Image: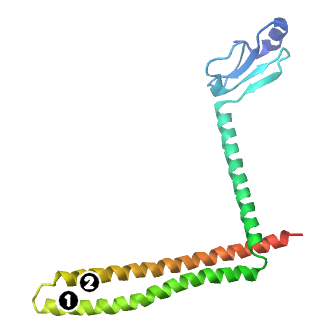
Amino acid sequence: MVSSALLTALLLIAGPAQAAMYRWVDSNGQVHYSDTLPPNYQKSGAAELNKHGQIIKRTLSEAERSQAAEKKAEQDRLQHEADEQARLDRALTSTYTTEAEIDLARDRALEHHRLAIKGAETRASAVNVNLKELRDRADRITKSGKALPRSLQAQLAQAEKEREELQRTVAQNEEAMVKVREKYDADKQRFRELQVKTP
């Protein structure tokens, strides 16, 4: 190990045939100069110096490499987002020429869900009527002191299951309609922004 004060003199004395001189930092943050690198220099980083004591090659420390990798990953993420937004913008402007066309597409998408809800509600009305009849029969049998036939139990279970499925269908389509409105509202807003940007 060579002290910083003697570095320049040693380099000048060594002459051109001398092996490279290195500057590195140990785990305690102490700076060292030597003609060889310790095995762990990859972790702390090091610099190769010329005969004038100037850095000609530098090895990043483990922390610096980690920071560089994180920075690169963030840059890649931002670039990916920018590329994806550009792709979506191209699709938007190639699909629609006016805001009215966006409204029309939204209404068509909503109508699909409205029809699904209407169909489920119509079927649910019939199921509820059937379920009431089945429950009334079950109540009469129970009041007479008899056991419910297995076939009636199965019919009740099936009707209740179908009613629950229809309720889920209605709820899912109502939720989908909210998302459709949000999507097309966002598309319309972005369309306006792109129209403003267009010269």
Q: CA distance from mark 2 to mark 1?
A: 9 Å
Quadrant housing residue 85 = bottom right
6 relative to 163, above or below: above
Q: Position of residue 27 (x, y in %)?
A: 61, 25
Quarter of image, res 176: bottom right
Count residues near mark 2 (Cα–Cα under 10 Å), then give few for <14, some for 14-19, many for 20+. some
Nearer-the-camera pick, 37 or 161: 161
Identify the element where label 2 is drawn: helix
- The residue indicated by pointer 2 is 156
Residue, far left:
145
Q: Nearer the viewer, residue 115 or 12?
A: 115
Total residue callouts: 2
Question: Could you tell me which residue is drawn at 59 percent across and 75 percent down?
Answer: 179
Percent across and percent down for residue 155 are 26, 83
| Observer-nearest of 49 and 127 | 127
Where residue 138 is drawn, which disc sits there? 1
Image-based side of 125 in relation to 176, left or right: left
Q: Amino acid at mark 1?
A: Ala
